[in-house]
Image (cartoon, coloured by chain):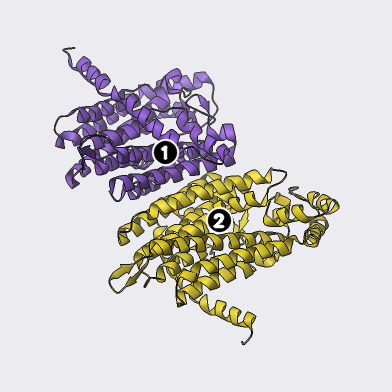
Chain colours: A yellow, B purple
Amino acid sequence: MAQGQSQLDYTMAKALEGLPLEATVVNQYIDGFLKGEPSGLYEAAAYLPKLGGKRLRPFVTITCGRLFGNAHAALYYSAMSVELLHNFTLVHDDIMDKDTLRRGHPTVHAKYGETIAILAGDLLFSRAFEAAALAERHSSEQGITEELAVASVRVDEGQYLDIDFEHRESVKLGEYLQMIYLKTAALYECAARIGGKVGGMDGPVRKRASTGELAALSEFGRFLGLAFQIRDDYLGMFGDPPKTGKAAGNDLLRGKKTAIVIAAFEEGSPSQLEQIKRVLGKHQAEESEVRSALDVLKQTGADTRCAALASEYYEKAVGALDLFGDSTQRQRLMALAKFAITRET
Amino acid sequence: MAQGQSQLDYTMAKALEGLPLEATVVNQYIDGFLKGEPSGLYEAAAYLPKLGGKRLRPFVTITCGRLFGNAHAALYYSAMSVELLHNFTLVHDDIMDKDTLRRGHPTVHAKYGETIAILAGDLLFSRAFEAAALAERHSSEQGITEELAVASVRVDEGQYLDIDFEHRESVKLGEYLQMIYLKTAALYECAARIGGKVGGMDGPVRKRASTGELAALSEFGRFLGLAFQIRDDYLGMFGDPPKTGKAAGNDLLRGKKTAIVIAAFEEGSPSQLEQIKRVLGKHQAEESEVRSALDVLKQTGADTRCAALASEYYEKAVGALDLFGDSTQRQRLMALAKFAITRET
C-alpha cells in the first residue's frame, strides 16, 4: 500500500464504495417515476433503466451537491433527471444505429418495435424534465430545467455530428473533441452544475455552489466527460468483448471517427492507413481482417496517444477540484475521474 | 347581420383577425430559436414549423395571457414552447405512422431520412423546454416547464393509446375521449394554463390568473382541445380532400377508432356494420368501396352525433369563460372555440 499506484487504487475503490448505495436510491426514485398507464408504454420506458447501468451521471450530481451538505430530495430529483435524459438518448440512438443489443439484452426497439421505442424514449425525455421541475420546486432553485434543456440540445447536436462523421473521409481532432463534448461531456457538465446549484443541506439550511465554485464544477464535469468518452472510444476498439459487451473493433467496422482512428490517420504510414481503410466503415469483415487492422492501429501508436489524451483530461478534471478543500466528497469525485480512464467496462 | 348565425360568423371573423398577426410574432420567435450549428440538423428541425400551421396553440397562450394585460416576452416564449412541442409530436408521429405528406409537403423523415427526423424531433422537444425555461426566467413565474413536461407526458400516452386502438376490435366512447384528451386536449389545456400563469403586463406590473381563473382556463383549454379533435376526426372522414390535405376516408382505411366509427358501431345495424368493416383498417381499398362505406357511416347518423359531441364541448369551453367579464380577448377565445368546430381545414 505504500506505493503510488496501489495507494491510488485503494483510494479509488474506497471512494467509489458509495456508488452502489447512491445508485440504489436513484433507482428507487426512477422506479417510482416510471410507473403509470398505459402500462405497455411505461413498461417499455422502464425497460432500459431497469437493465442497469453504472449511474455515473447521478453519482456526479449527488456528489457535487454533497460537497455543500447532506443529500436531500431535490438533489435526488435532479440526479434522476440527468439519468432519465441519458437513458432517453440511448433508446433513440439505438434506433438510429440499428443496434439490437445493449447491456447484454435486446434494445428497446428490438424488443418492443420501433414505434413503441420512439414513444418510450420520448416518455423518458418528458419525465426527465418533470424530474428537473420537481427538483426546482423542492429546492426553490431556478434554472435546473434550463440547464437540462441546454444539455439535451447539445447531446442532440453531438449525436448528429457523430453520425455525420461516419460518412466523412476524415475528421480533425478538434472536430472530434467538439463532437464528444456535445454528445457526452455536456451532460456530465450539466450533471455537475445542477448538483452544485441544488447543493446540500446543512441542517435546515440549503447550501449551494457560489458562482466560482459552479464554474469549477462545470470544468470538472466537462473534462470528466471528455476523459470518459475517450476511454469509451478506446474500449470500443481494443476493449475485451466479454467485458464491454461489444464486438472487437466494433467502432472500426461502423466507420466511427474516434480518437483512435484520428490519431492513426495523423501518425500512420500510407501502407498502414491502407490496411486500416480496408476495414473502416465496411460493416462486414473477416475476423482476421479486423484483428490485423487493430494490430496496425496499435503499431501507429494510436492506442497510446488515445490513453494520453484521456489522461490529460483526467488531470484537468482533477485540477478543477483544487478550488475545494479536501473532503470525502471531493475524493469521491477524483476517484470517479480515475475510474473513467481506467475502467474496462 | 341581424340574425344569430351571421352575427356569430361576423364576430368570429372579427375576433380572429389578430391571429395572423400573433402568428407572425410567434414565427419570428421560432425562426430565431431554430438557427444553429450543425446547420443540417437545424434545417431539418426548422423545416416543419416553416411549412406553416395555424398556430392555434400559441394563439391560446397569448390570448389567455392578454386577458390580464399586454403581451410581453415571457408570454411569447411560453407560446413558442407549446408550438415547438406540438411540432415535435408531428415529426415523430409522422415517422410512426409512416406518413409521407403533411401540409402538402414531404414529411421530415420523407425528406431527410428517419435518423435525422428523430434527431430533428428531439431538438424541437429540447428547444421547447428551453423556451419554457426562458419564459420562467423572463417572468419569474415558476412551474411553466413543469406544466409543459406534464403535458408532454400526456401527449405521449395519448399517442400510444391512439396506435393501440388501431389494433383493437372496438373502443368505447369513454376510452376514446380519454385518448383524445391525452393526445390533443392536454396540450391545449397546457397552452391556456401557461398563458394564464404568465399573464399580461399592466404598465410595469405583471398580472396573472388567480387560482380560480386558472382552473377556468384549464377547463376552457381542455374542452376546446376535445372539440378541436372531434372536429379533426370528422374532417379526417368526411372532409374535403383539397381542403384537409388528406384522402377521403383516410382514418377509415387506417382503422382509427374515432368518434365517427364509435358512434356508428353504437347505432348501426348489423348489415351496416358489415359494410363499414369491409374497409375499416384495410389500408388499401377501391375508391367506390370507401365512398359507400362513408355513405353508410352517414346513414347510421354517426356524422350528426359527432358534430353534436363537438358542439357539446364547444358549449362547455365557452361556458368556462363565464368567469371572465366581456372583453376583446374573451371574445377572441370564444371565436376560436367556434372556429374549432366549424373549420373545414
Please name the amino acid that badge 1 sits on: Leu
Up the image or down, B61 lies above or below A290; here it is above
Q: Nearer the viewer, residue A142 or A48?
A: A142
The quadrant of the rendering that contains the C terminus of chain B is: top left
Q: Nearer the viewer, residue B71 or A160?
A: B71
Please name the amino acid that badge 2 sits on: Thr
Instruction: Where is residue A95? Give x, y as percent.
Output: 58, 48
Task: Identify the residue position indicated by label 2 in the image.
Answer: A184
Up the image or down, A188 lies above or below B3; here it is below
Instruction: Where is residue B174? Give x, y as percent.
Output: 32, 41
Helix, strand or loop at mark 1: helix
Mark carried by residue B84: 1
Mark carried by residue A247: none
Are the numbered discs 2 and 1 placed on the same chain, yes or no?
no
Residue B263 appears left or right of B43:
left
Helix, strand or loop at mark 2: helix
The reply to whether residue B165 is visible in this rendering is: yes
- Residue for point 63% across, 43% down: A164
Instruction: Where is residue B99? Give x, y as percent.
Output: 53, 32
The reply to whether residue B173 is visible in this rendering is: no
Chain at numbered mark 1: B
Chain at numbered mark 2: A
How packed mark 1 is, by other alpha carbons closer than 10 Å (few <14, some 14-19, many 20 or more), is many
